Image: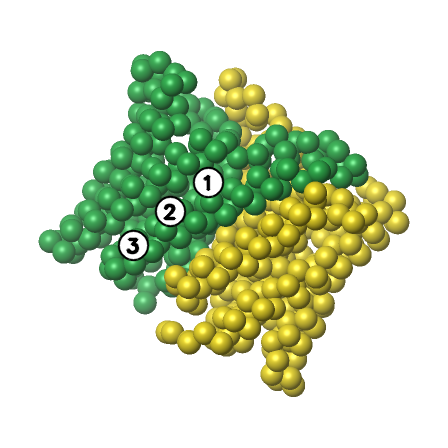
C-alpha cells in the first residue's frame, strides 16, 4: 500500500515540476522550488515504512527541489544561485512563522477537536526546520557547482544530473540527520536512517533525470 | 491576542512580497504565489475567533495571492497573470493530493503524531476540496474583474478593491458552503461567510500600498 502511494507521490511531484516549467519557465521553476521545500517541511512529520525502509515523508518533494534546481542551472547558469538559496531560506522561515502563529491562535469553540489536531500536527519542530534549511542550502550550493562544472566539461544532462544528485543528496542527508537526530539515536540506528534516506533520494533523483531531459527540450 | 496574530501575519506577508520582488522582480511574485498557495490551504483547516467573528485563518495568504495577481496584471499584463493563476491552481491541486496521500500512508508503529495527522485531514477533507474549488473560481474572477475595471479606471485602489470584493465574496461563499453546509446551523454558516468576507476586505485594502509601491518601481525584464 505505502509503496503504491509513494510512487503516486513521486509521479505527482514530477508532473508538477514539468507543468511549472512548461507554464511559466524560470518563474515556474522558482515557484516550484519554494513549493517543494515548504510542503516537504510540512509533511515530513509522519514516518512510514516503504520498500522495507523507515523514512519520513517529504522525500519526493525534497528531491524534486534539487531536480528543479539542476534544471535551473542547466537553462540559466549559476549566476543567481545564492539569491535562490536565500529565497529558499526566507520562504522556509516565513512558512514556519505562519505555522507557529497559526497554531498559537486561540482556538474557536466551533470546531474544537479539529483545531486541537491542527495545533498538534502543524506546530513546527524548529530543530527539524533549521536542520532542513541548513542541509538544503549547503547541498543546493554544492549541487549547482557540481552540475555547472560537469556541464562545462561535458554538456550531457544525465551525467551532470546524476553526479550532482549523488553528491548533493549525500551531503544533505548527512547534515540533516546529523543536526536533527544525532543525540536521539545510537550510531547504528543513525547509520541505518541515513542509508534509507539517501538510497531513496538518490533513486528518485536518478529517475528524475527523465524529467530534466524532457523539460530541457522545451523552449 | 488573535488580532495581534492577524496583524503579524499580515506584516509578514507584505514583507514577503516586498523582499521577493526586490530579489527576483516578476519571478518573485510567482514565488510568493507558490508559497502562499500551500500556506492558504493548510491554514484554512483552522478557525479562530477574531472580534466575535469565526474566521478561517487562511485568508491572509489567500489575499497575498490576489495581491500578486493584481501586480502581475497591472505591471506585466494579462498573460503573466493567467500564468500565475494556472501555476497557483496546479500547485494547490498537487498540494491537495500530497496532503491526502499523507493521511493515507500506513505509519510506522513508533510514529505517535500520525493518528492526529489522519484525524485532521480526514475530518477536514471537505475543507480541502472546498479550498481548491473556491481558489480556482475566485482567482479567475479576480483577474477577469480587475481587467474589466482596469479598462475603465486606471487606478490600483479601485481595481483591486472591486475585484477583491467580488472574488472574496465568491471565495467565502463557495468555501463555507462546501466545507460546512449541513454540518452547522444556517446562522453559523452566515456568520462564517460574512466574517471571512469582511476580514478579506480589510486585508485587501492593507495590501494596496505595497501594490502601489511595486507598481512604481522600475520595470526590469
Q: Residue B110 at x, y = what percent? A: 51, 17
Q: Do the residues bearing badges 2 and 3 touch, measured as CB atoms within 8 Å?
A: no
In the foreground, A118 or B104: A118
> Gap in Å between the C-alphas at discs 3 and 1?
20 Å
Q: Can residue A71 be seen here? A: no
Q: Residue A87 at x, y = what percent? A: 40, 52
Crowdedness near tag 1: few (<14), some (14–19) or many (≥20) residues, C-alpha within 10 Å: many
Q: Which residue is mark 2?
A: A65
Q: Is residue B198 above or below residue A86?
A: below
Asked if residue A127 lies left or right of residue A114, the reply is left
Colour used to depict chain B in the structure image: yellow
Q: Which mark is residue A40?
A: 1
Q: Do the residues bearing badges 2 and 1 touch, measured as CB atoms within 8 Å?
A: yes
| Residue at point 30%, 58% (across, down) | A80
Q: Which residue is mark 3?
A: A81
Letter of the green chain: A
Secondary structure under tag 3 reads helix
Amino acid at each position: 500500500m505505502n509503496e503504491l502511494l509513494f510512487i503516486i507521490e513521486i509521479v505527482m511531484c514530477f508532473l508538477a515540476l514539468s507543468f511549472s516549467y512548461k507554464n511559466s519557465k524560470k518563474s515556474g521553476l522558482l515557484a516550484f522550488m519554494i513549493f517543494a521545500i515548504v510542503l516537504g517541511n510540512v509533511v515530513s512529520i509522519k514516518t512510514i515504512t516503504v520498500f522495507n525502509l523507515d523514512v519520513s515523508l517529504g522525500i519526493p518533494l525534497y528531491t524534486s527541489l534539487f531536480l528543479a534546481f539542476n534544471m535551473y542551472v542547466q537553462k540559466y547558469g549559476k549566476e543567481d544561485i545564492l539569491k535562490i538559496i536565500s529565497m529558499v531560506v526566507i520562504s522556509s522561515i516565513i512558512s514556519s512563522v505562519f505555522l507557529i502563529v497559526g497554531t498559537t491562535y486561540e482556538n474557536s469553540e466551533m470546531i474544537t477537536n479539529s483545531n486541537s489536531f491542527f495545533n498538534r500536527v502543524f506546530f513546527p519542530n524548529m530543530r527539524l526546520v533549521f536542520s532542513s534549511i541548513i542541509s538544503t542550502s549547503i547541498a543546493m550550493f554544492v549541487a549547482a557547482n557540481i552540475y555547472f562544472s560537469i556541464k562545462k566539461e561535458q554538456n550531457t544532462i544525465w551525467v551532470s544530473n546524476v553526479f550532482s544528485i549523488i553528491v548533493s543528496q549525500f551531503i544533505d542527508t548527512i547534515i540533516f540527520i546529523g543536526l536533527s537526530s544525532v543525540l536521539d539515536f545510537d550510531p547504528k540506528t543513525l547509520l541505518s536512517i541515513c542509508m534509507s534516506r539517501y538510497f531513496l533520494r538518490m533513486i528518485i533523483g536518478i529517475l528524475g533525470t527523465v524529467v530534466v531531459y524532457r523539460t530541457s527540450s522545451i523552449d | 491576542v488573535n488580532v495581534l496574530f492577524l496583524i503579524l501575519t499580515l506584516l509578514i506577508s507584505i514583507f514577503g512580497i516586498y523582499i521577493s520582488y526586490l530579489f527576483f522582480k516578476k519571478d518573485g511574485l510567482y514565488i510568493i504565489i507558490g508559497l502562499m498557495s500551500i500556506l492558504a490551504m493548510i491554514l484554512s483547516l483552522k478557525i479562530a475567533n477574531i472580534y466575535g467573528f469565526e474566521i478561517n485563518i487562511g485568508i491572509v495568504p489567500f489575499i497575498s495571492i490576489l495581491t500578486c495577481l493584481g501586480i502581475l496584471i497591472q505591471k506585466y499584463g494579462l498573460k503573466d497573470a493567467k500564468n500565475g493563476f494556472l501555476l497557483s491552481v496546479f500547485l494547490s491541486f498537487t498540494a491537495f493530493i500530497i496532503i491526502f496521500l499523507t493521511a493515507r500512508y500506513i505509519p510506522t508503529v513508533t510514529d505517535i503524531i500520525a493518528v492526529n495527522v489522519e484525524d485532521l485531514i480526514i475530518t477536514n477533507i471537505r475543507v480541502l476540496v472546498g479550498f481548491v474549488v473556491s481558489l480556482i473560481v475566485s482567482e479567475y474572477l479576480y483577474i477577469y474583474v480587475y481587467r474589466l475595471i482596469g479598462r475603465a479606471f486606471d487606478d490600483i485602489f479601485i481595481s483591486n478593491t472591486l475585484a477583491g470584493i467580488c472574488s472574496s465574496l465568491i471565495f467565502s461563499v463557495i468555501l463555507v458552503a462546501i466545507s460546512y453546509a449541513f454540518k452547522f446551523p444556517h446562522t453559523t454558516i452566515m456568520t462564517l461567510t460574512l466574517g471571512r468576507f469582511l476580514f478579506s476586505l480589510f486585508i485587501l485594502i492593507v495590501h494596496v500600498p505595497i501594490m502601489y509601491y511595486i507598481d512604481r518601481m522600475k520595470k526590469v525584464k
